[in-house]
Structures are given as C-alpha cells and as structure tokens.
Amino acid sequence: MLNRLSLFKGWLLLIVLAKALSINFPANAQIIQTNHQMQDSLQERIRQQQEEQNQQTQERMKETWLRQNLQQPQLLQPQQKIQQQQFTRQRQEMLRQQQFRLQQDQLRIQQQEFSRQQQLRIQDQQLRQDQQIRQQQEFRLQEQRRQQQLRQQNKNL
C-alpha cells in the first residue's frame, strides 16, 4: 500500500512537472534546439548591431572633436583639454556599456544552457520511470498468468 501511494505521488509529481515544463519528448527536443539556435542567431545580430552603433558613435565623436579643433584653432588650451577629457569619458562609458552587454549575453547563454540541461535530465528521468513502470506491469501480468495456470492445474487435479 505504501509503495503504491509513493508511486502514485511520484507519478502525480511527474505529471505536474511535465505540464509545467510542457515536455513532449522528440518534438519538444527539436523545438528546444531550434529555439536555442534562433536565440543564438538573434543574439549575434543584436551584438553586431551594437558594435556597429558603437563604432558609428566613436567615429561621430572623433569627427566632432577634429572638426572643432581644426575649424577653431584659436581655442584656448584649457578648453581643448576639457573637450579631450569629455571625449575620453564618453568613450570609456561606451566601452563600459559594451562590456556590460557582453556580460549579459554570456549570462543569458549560460542560463539557456542550464535550462536545456535541466530539461534533458527531466526527460531522461521520465524515460527511466516509464521503463520501470512497463517492467512492473509486465511482471504483474506474468505473475497473474502464472497464478491462473496454477489455479487451472489445481482444478484439473
């Protein structure tokens, strides 16, 4: 009775997990892989766009700085120094933001890989449990057949 109750609880938990994770063995594995590939390509495009934007921003800042310095040679030395400092700060901030985005991308990829591994472990566990249940059912059927044969033999005697 205790084994049946724990088996029932295990199945119930498994069903709840399967519903929660929407696991559908071969089809879902293919969908997971396709989604993973799509996310990778999307992240790559986003990263490329960000790099292009950063490069364009750097070029614009450099052009602005050069234009101001070439068009206005009468600028005082302190003002040029201030502009250079501003340019340097902006560049450092832009690089910091780019590094932060790259770290976020890496973290996102790690989380996706962890989720994928978790789903695979759950699928493996469910397969093993299904096999166990099939074996138990087969054993019960064999036992019932054996009992019936014994009863039949006893009747015939």
Image (cartoon, grey):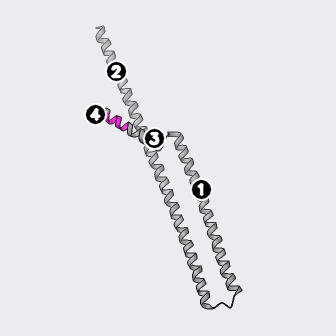
- Image height of 118 relative to 68, above or below: above
Residue depicted at x 61% and y 88%:
79
Could one spot residue 69 in this view of the protein? yes
Front residue of this view, candidates 29 and 88: 88
Q: Secondary structure at mark 1?
A: helix
Q: Secondary structure at mark 2?
A: helix
Q: Give the secondary structure at mark 3.
A: helix
Q: Picture coordinates of residue 24 (x, y %)?
A: 50, 39
Residue to which mark 1 is pinned:
42
Residue 4 located left or right of residue 34: left
Identify the disc placed on residue 144.
2
Q: Check whether the beta carbons of the residues at disc 3 and disc 2 lie within 8 A of each other.
A: no
Task: Tell me which segment is drawn in magenta.
Answer: 5-11
- Comparing marks 2 and 1, which lies closer to the viewer? 1
Residue located 30% across and 9% down the image: 155
Quarter of the image with the C terminus in it: top left
Q: Residue furthest toward the top?
A: 157
Mark 4 to mark 3: distance in Å?
A: 26 Å
User: Mark 4 or mark 2, which has the lower sequence index?
Assistant: 4
Q: Which mark is residue 93?
A: none
Task: Identify the residue shown where x is 38% and y is 34%.
Answer: 132
Mark 2 → mark 1, Cα distance in angstroms: 57 Å
Whether residue 63 appears in magenta in the rendering, the answer is no
Task: Name which of mark 3 and mark 2 comes first in the sequence.
Answer: 3
> Which numbered dot is residue 2?
4
Disc 3 marks which amino acid? Lys
Left or right placement of residue 23 versus residue 45 in this view: left
